[in-house]
Amino acid sequence: MARFKNGLKKTKDSLGKRLFLAFSARALDDKFYSELEEALLSADVGIGATQNLIEQLKDEIYSQKIKVPADAKALLKDLLIQSIDFEFSEYDFPLVILLSGVNGVGKTTAIGKLANKFKNEGKSVVIAAADTFRAAASEQLEVWGERAGVRVVHHGEGSDPAAVVFDAISSAKAKGTEVVLIDTAGRLHNKKNLMEELKKICRVVERELPNSDFRKYLVLDATTGQNAISQAEIFSEAIELDGIVLTKLDGTAKGGVVVAIAEDAFLPVLYVGIGEKIDDLIDFDATEFISEMLD
Amino acid sequence: MGLFDNLTDKMNHIFSKMKNRGRLSELEIKQAMREIRIALLEADVNFAVVKSFVQTVSEKALHEDILKSLSPDQQVIKIVKDELTELMGSKHTKLAVDPKPPTIYMMCGLQGAGKTTMCGKLANMLRKEGKKVMLVACDIYRPAAIKQLQIVGEKAKVTVFEKGQIAPTKIAKEALHFADKNDIDTIIIDTAGRLHIDEELMSELIDLKKLVKPAEILLVVDAMTGQDAVTVADAFNHQLDLTGVILTKLDGDTRGGAALSIKAVTGKPIKFSGTGEKMEDIEPFHPDRMATRILGMGDVLSLIEKAENAFSQEDALDLQKKIKEKSFTLNDYLKQLESIKKMGNLGSMMQMIPGLAGKMKGADAEIDENKIAKTKAIILSMTPKERKKPEILKASHRKRIAAGSGATIQEVNQLLKQFDMTKQMMNRMASGKKMPFSM
């Protein structure tokens, strides 16, 4: 938890200060609510979700007969936690995890870190380098594979990603590997043919490993703004996402857009990336995440 | 997203209710400002920037002349658009060139912003302008970053200078030496992505800047960045005194409010935007066009420019003649389709059309590109004679064409029907009747 705190330290600085100021106001007046609104907006929670949260808060304040801003703080915290707290269903093995997302969010790095994580838990892991589009993507993944001590299956640049996945799965079946991690090419979600390619990869997994636990995650850069909602919606439409990996939370961005996504697309956050080292990927904890944001 | 995606629609809606009453009240203006605020926040413009912006616009909009004018909705939108454009810098600013070569451009930014790809695009563009360009690989941290730059450099047909993973200042020093010997006049330095709060890595950039004295230090920013864009840009600018900004990934459905935030906070101009994955996908930044995009109002100018690039003057004259003579054939039909394809991704074009911007969730627009490819295959499977006179096609011919193009007979029939309709429309145009809205 200490590392989670460090990762979120910078996040806390400005938002925490803003909220602190808002909650130290004297009365529950318009000024209080507008400061609260600004605080949430500054965290990328987005105007829709922010207005909903404030409406809910007003209802609670009314029904619980709260009179001062300081008492409203715990209420807001609960509302925020509730909004992003999902139950996690434990993994079954063999497990296949596919990471998708737009360009530059950190998919390849997250794959490397996930590989390391499962390896440390004593699982056997193989990585499918299905980003056959970006220049030098599979070389980058090989470096990560080496660091984690994990096998990487790759073909040449421009080859069929589904074929890479097929090979990785065949290899996993032959060797009894427990975890297959699939890295995919970054794609802007409005490119139809690339979304079709993702669907094809999923079909290969479902056909070749029908009894596996297959999870499809969207990797999201914590610095992303409201476009993240559209990303979550469109990727979900194509491949029915199971959740989100939130990267780059070691910067000053707050990643508040996950609140909006939880509300809109009903998607939980599973992991957060908090640095560049191989073990800088940790399990998401809603209470910790919100507490660190507000305290 | 609310009931309306588009600010123009929202404004029309607010003002239409009031129109028959003749004039607007302050209340309506306030309502309009609320919608503008939401539009800007949804576009990821920084909340503090939005606040002061809405204040300025409100003051101007509350001016008596506007309240009394006949089309206050248009007036208010015009004020908003003009103010936005003004805020982003009124016109495109060019890259500085060092009077004493080599001219050095240094790229910097967060991880994953798209620096390496943008280096390639910039190099490609400058090479085409006749510069002798060299890329320098100073990202010594990310695995395979050097390799990526080499591949990008190959695509851009420029030299890539690398020295492996040694100190960036050492690499730069040797690169300058190499440039001197090899008559290189333009150097683009790729640097590692870094967090603006990483003091160690930021001071590495400062050292690099001191050494190479670049003509431009350009911050590369992902157009999808949210509220944090101001913090990042401000930190980079504060430590490096940027000369400009490049916005990447503008080909998605993002509205790119980060552009406005960054300009407002740093005062530095946005010089280019990246709009796709190919080396050619770099465009000079136009503040006025960005303003309409942020507002979700479409970008007619960029669309017209793309159309102008795709259709040559002769083609246009030729087409005009054919329409007049009513001699439009399947060959011409094919040519038209190819021109449309040349204009680029149909999805991104939809985003530029007012009223369609924001409404199209992009995904469906690209089916049409497949359709164009199929249409092309069908037409190319016909004999020259058949292309000129499709009415001679019998069922057996159609069967042959279907087999030859991998299409079904229904698809062949559909194409012929479509062509027939297009021709009828052309004939109507020739006889001076009004054209229906959709093709």
Image (cartoon, coloured by chain):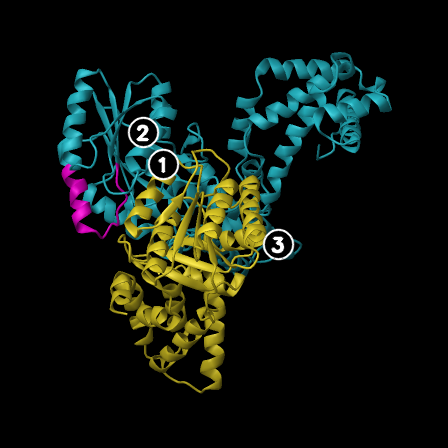
For image coordinates 26% across by 53% down, the residue present is A277
Does mark 2 fall on the same chain as mark 3? yes
Query: Mark 2 sits on what residue?
Result: B150
Q: How many residues crowd around disc 3 within 10 Å: few (fewer than 14), some, or many (20 or more)?
A: some
Q: CA distance from mark 2 to mark 1?
A: 9 Å
Q: Which chain is cyan?
A: B
Magenta stretch encompasses residue B402: no
Q: Chain of mark 1?
A: A
Depth check, front residue: B32 or A184: A184
For image coordinates 42% across by 73% down, the residue present is A81
For image coordinates 19% across by 46% down, the residue present is B201
Find out whether the residues at labels 3 and 1 contact each other: C-beta distance under 8 Å: no
Secondary element at image label 1: loop
Give the mark toward the camera: 3 or 1: 1
> Please, is residue A18 above or below residue B126 in the view?
below
Q: Name the quadrant of the C terminus of chain B.
A: top right
Q: How many residues crowd around disc 1 within 10 Å: few (fewer than 14), some, or many (20 or more)?
A: many
Q: Residue B3's image quarter?
A: bottom right
Depth check, front residue: B422 or A68: B422
For image coordinates 28% across by 49% down, the residue present is A147
- Magenta residues span B191-209
Amino acid at circle 3: His
Q: Where's residue B43, x and y in %?
A: 46, 51
Find out whether the residues at labels 3 and 2 contact each other: C-beta distance under 8 Å: no
Q: Residue furthest bottom?
A: A65
Q: Chain of mark 3?
A: B
Amino acid at circle 1: Ala
Amino acid at circle 2: Gln
Q: CA distance from mark 3 to mark 1?
A: 50 Å
Query: Mark 1 sits on what residue?
Result: A136
Q: Where's residue B381, x and y in %?
A: 72, 20
